Image (spheres, rainbow, N blue to C red):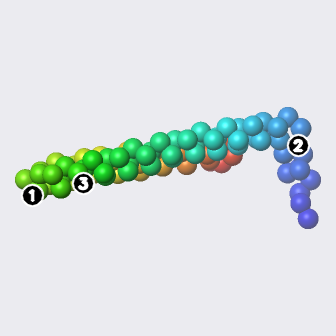
Amino acid sequence: MQNSSSNKQDSGVTGAAKFVTSTVGNVAGGVGRTAGNVVGAAGRGLGDTVTSATGSTGKPVGDAVSSVGNGVQNGAEGVSKGVENAGQWKK
């Protein structure tokens, strides 16, 4: 059985606000995650291209470019999760 105070907490204006912020948070989080994935994939692809085109001489540069792409993707993932959590009123 649910606690009546929790039912009151999620009703009316508070419930509407939670719905709106949850929706906005999920959309913003999804867009951020998608952008991070695109940049990450592009960075890895560019890094692989540099390595393939230059061989062992350019491998450190290609690896560095790939690492930057991975870092951007991981950072965007963390920010997106935080935005989604905030939209759901999680701490």
Residue where numbered disc 2 is placed: 11
**Hey, which quadrant is residue 72 in on the image?**
top left
Which one is in front, 12 or 24?
24
Which one is in front, 53 or 58?
53
Query: 10 Å neighbourhood of mark 3: few (<14), some, or many (≥20)?
Result: some
| Figure quadrant of the N terminus | bottom right
Q: Secondary structure at mark 3?
A: helix
C-alpha span from label 1 to label 3: 12 Å
Query: 10 Å neighbourhood of mark 1: few (<14), some, or many (≥20)?
Result: few
Residue where numbered disc 1 is placed: 56
Picture coordinates of residue 3, whole percent (x, y): 89, 57
Picture coordinates of residue 70, whole percent (x, y): 35, 51
Amino acid at pointer 3: Asp
Residue drawn at 47 percent across, 42 percent down: 35
**Front label number (3 vs 2):** 3
Whether residue 24 is situated above or below residue 62 in the rendered picture: above
Residue where numbered disc 3 is placed: 48
Task: Please tell me which of labels 3 and 2 falls first in the chain.
Answer: 2
**Tag 1–tag 3 contact (CB < 8 Å):** no
**Hey, which quadrant is residue 12 in on the image?**
top right
- The answer to whether residue 86 is visible is no
Residue ranking furthest to the left: 57
Amino acid at pointer 2: Ser
Task: Please tell me which of labels 2 and 1 falls first in the chain.
Answer: 2
Task: Please tell me which of labels 1 and 3 falls first in the chain.
Answer: 3
